[in-house]
Image: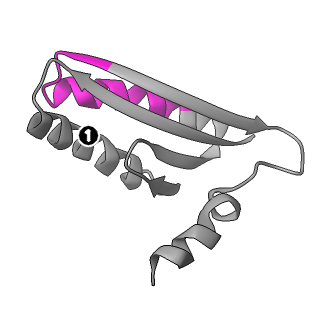
Amino acid sequence: MQASVAIQVLPSRVDNDEVCRIVDEVIAYIKSQGLKTFVSPFETTIEGDYDKLMEIVKECQLIAVRAGAPEVCSYVKIDYNPSDEGILTISKKTDKYVADNAE
């Protein structure tokens, strides 16, 4: 069950420095899961098993609250393809642009 999830976690009712600190904790958790990830200014994309990704999405809310967010709004996009063809990967979507940014 391959899937790709893009998640944007937005702690509410905190200042910008706190937003960054809390989001950094969420991103650190996501990266600790050992899956392919791509961090961008507005969201983090993760690839892997659908069930595992749904667990990560759930945990992101809890981490943000434990880190001090009184409220969390999250926006999630899911690309799921159970066939052998799989999903359109992060690499297929972004590699040509990442190379452009290296110049």
Residue at x-position 38% and y-position 29%: 59
Would residue 48 be found to the left or right of residue 57 on screen? right
Magenta region: 54-72
- 58 on left or right of 51: left
Residue designated by label 1: 23
Q: State the residue at coordinates (41%, 34%).
A: 8
Q: Residue at x 45, y 80 (%)?
A: 102
Residue 27 image offset from top left, x and y in percent: 33, 47
Q: Position of residue 71 (x, y in %)?
A: 23, 15
Q: Residue furthest bottom?
A: 103
Q: Quadrant of the C terminus?
A: bottom left
- Indicate whether residue 31 is drawn in magenta: no
Which quarter of the figure has residue 49? top right
* Colouring: one colour
Callout 1 secondary element: helix
Q: Seen in the image, is 56 located left or right of residue 14?
A: right
Seen at 56% across and 38% down, the residue is: 52
The image shows residue 60 at horizontal and vertical percentages of 36, 32
Q: Main secondary structure of the magenta part?
A: helix
Q: Quadrant of residue 53?
A: top right
Q: Nearer the viewer, residue 17 or 54?
A: 17
Which quadrant is home to the N terminus?
Answer: top right
Q: What x and y, as percent, mark residue 76?
A: 52, 28
Q: Residues within 10 Å of mark 1 (few under 14, many from 20)?
A: many
Compared with 71, 5 (above or below) is: below
Q: Is residue 99 left or right of residue 61?
A: right
- Going by the numbered disc 1, the residue's amino acid type is Val
